[in-house]
Amino acid sequence: METLAALSNGFAVALTPYALMWSALGVTLGTAIGVLPGIGPALTVALLLPVTYQLDSTYAFIMFAGIYYGAMYGGSTTAILLNTPGESGSIITAVDGHAMARQGRGAQALATAAIGSFVAGTIATAALTFVAPLMVRLALMFGPAEYFALMVLAFTTITSLFGSSVSRGFASLLIGLAIGLVGLDLQTGQPRLTFGSIELMDGIDTVVLAVGLFAIGETLYLAARHRFEREEIYALKGSLWMSREDWARSWKPWLRGTLLGFPIGAMPAGGSEIPTFMSYALEKRLSKHPEQFGHGAIEAVAGPEAANNAAVAGVLAPLLAFGLPTSAVAAIMLAAFQQYGLQPGPLLFENNPQLVWGMIASLYIANVLLLMLNLPMAGVWVKLLLIPRPWLYAGILVISTLGTYTLNNNATDLVILWAIGLLGLGMRITNVPVAPCIVGLILGPLAEQQFRRALVISQGDPSVFLTHPISAGLLTLAVLLVVLPALHRRRTPKAAPTAALAAPEA
């Protein structure tokens, strides 16, 4: 009953005209960003961090959550009509979704994706409503040793999850940790890595790093790889509504995708990619027509899209309860919390219930708004694909630069912004993930503080991290996440990719 009372208070916030305006803006921006290939939700939230600096934190996070949900919806549009996923969670959708578009059934593919996203998003948000308070109760049992172990787990999961290798992930993490050291030591007051610069005494702003890596670096990379070729977009034909057979073949995958997406998204190594591939494999195994997979099976669109959107709510659970990011967007939202001087965790639920429950309530509203936006306006969103890419990239760079300057009206921030942007470009070229760098900058100083506090409490005894059951368990899990995949790769012989998930030749 306490949770339902808190949720009702959240709806009192989310249903105000001002909150509805920001929610509608967020889902509209998110859908548009999801439709545009290569411009994902992480880049968008990073781009808006400087712009929302003066905005009330509750409304800012309502908008950010709407962008996250909207991008998951919109990513299926380009995956189906252009065979180019708008974001990573829609990769597997492109296989059968684009095959359906080539057969003239693109409208039905978009419909099952939109309705499945609504069903999964609503159920997963309900799960978030009741799971997050339970996770908060667990977090209340944490002391300095447990929080340090949790941050070590965050470091290992984010480096293992992103990138083509663990070594590249750890390289990115070390860069972030090094940047996090810049400034004054909080305990001794001694400058670290400032090189005599007064401007660096306060450290490097997380917003500047996030915008530099995601907005500047990613945009420069996309612009460098842009091909001035006309992309073939399959037009929508016939009715947007699904037939009775389409409904019969879609509703079970929607529910199964939801059951896969939420818990996996909430796991330390979850994200949205793993449950979508698992959903695809599960639906193929259970289907009465497995031979249609890869050639336009509607279940292969319904299940993964449901898993994709359910994973979003799953990602938010550990972020709000522990401050543990399990996706790139969660890492950027963690930077947004830092921007407002907030730390996710039990104190956030206690001191800022309006923000937490207002954002959770807004997710229910966002799902309804997205269904209204995506079903009747699918043809409108396709028009966004006609925007010249050079105009789009130039606009992002200009907005990023102006927005960062308005933070402190300091030209030094612009120098740091573009230096980090070029660093981000180099990381993208060398296939080094950028999300661990953000996590290293944000959680690095916090991990250092908790480490020092734990040693002070234990009078310098480092065994405190192993004698406390929760911290020992978290550290063991962190080690296993690094060691087990390496052992698996060493023992498993290299084999050709399975044809089950490969896209059919055109």
Image (cartoon, helix red, strand yellow):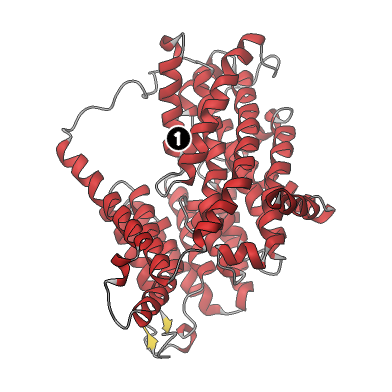
| Tally of numbered tags | 1
In the picture, measured across the screen, residue 417 lies left or right of residue 15, that is left
Q: In the rendered image, is residue 85 in sight?
A: no
Horizontal side of residue 61 vs 162, given as left or right: right
Indicate the position of residue 20 as horizontal and vertical percent values: 78, 50
Position of the C terminus, as image quadrant, is: top left
Residue 28 appears left or right of 291: right
Quadrant of residue 294 within the rendered picture: top left
Q: How far across and down, in percent of the image, does residue 338 sit?
A: 55, 68
Q: Nearer the viewer, residue 175 or 444?
A: 444
Residue flagged by tag 1: what amino acid is it?
A: Pro
Residue 141 sits above or below residue 361 on the image: below
Query: Residue at position x 42%, y 77% from top?
Result: 449
**Which residue is located at x 57 percent, y 26 percent?**
255
Q: Is residue 164 above or below residue 220?
A: above
> For the residue carrying disc 1, how many other residues have a C-alpha within 10 Å: few (<14), some (14-19), or many (20+)?
many
Residue 429 image position (x, y, % from top left)? 34, 52
Quadrant of residue 61 within the rendered picture: bottom right
Element type where label 1 sits in the image: helix
In the figure, 119 relative to 59: above or below? above
Depth check: 31 or 65 in front?
65
Q: Position of residue 336 (x, y in %)?
A: 58, 63
Toward the right, the furthest residue is: 17
Is residue 200 something one can see in this rendering? yes
Q: Nearer the viewer, residue 177 or 377?
A: 177
Residue that numbered label 1 is attached to: 275
Q: Nearer the viewer, residue 136 or 268?
A: 136
Relative horizontal placement of residue 358, taking residue 210 as reference (left or right): right
